[in-house]
Amino acid sequence: MPNIKSAAKRLRQNEKCRVFNRMRKSRVRTSENILDDLIKAGDKEAVVAGLTKCYSELDKAAKNGVIHKNKASRKKQRLAARVAKMA
């Protein structure tokens, strides 16, 4: 338990950030899993829509510092390659 007022505030801030970061990472993983299912199903239009959604989630996570921008770029590149391979 913090003894200093600023340390208590920092504890509260860290908890809020932790929850937000977990939520954002979870959204990224969920969108990737949905895209996997769409690729397995083979519906081209749905896959393109899912890829766009996945790109959006990755960009948002990178913008907020939840994941590194290069990691987001790498994931986007690999997802695009899988979609291209499907087509």
Image (cartoon, rainbow, N blue to C red):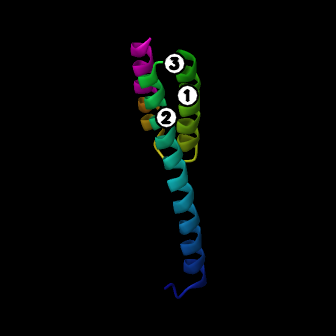
Report how far apart the C-alphas of labels 3 and 1 lie in the structure: 10 Å
Task: Give how far across and how far down residue 16 sits, in percent.
Answer: 58, 65
Task: Give how far across and how far down residue 6 sits, in percent.
Answer: 59, 78
- Point out the residue furthest to the front here: 41
Look at the numbered discs 1 and 2 and tell me whether their residues touch, using CB distance below 8 Å. yes
Which numbered disc flags the more N-terminal residue, 3 or 1?
3
Up-down: is 10 above or below 47? below
User: What quarter of the picture does the C terminus occupy?
Assistant: top left
- Give the magenta part as a residue range: 76-87
Q: Is label 2 in a helix, a strand or a loop?
A: helix
Q: Residue at x 56, y 36 (%)?
A: 59
Relative to 77, is 5 on the left or the right?
Answer: right
Q: Is label 3 in a helix, a strand or a loop?
A: loop
* Circle 1 residue: 50
Q: Which mark is residue 43?
A: 3
Look at the numbered discs 2 and 3 and tell me whether their residues touch, using CB distance below 8 Å. no
Up-down: is 53 above or below 27? above
Q: Which mark is residue 34?
A: 2
Instruction: Determine if residue 86 is in view.
Output: yes
Q: Residue at x 40, y 21 (%)?
A: 82
| Residue 50 among magenta residues | no
Mark 2 Cα shell of 10 Å, populated few (<14), some (14-19), many (≥20): some
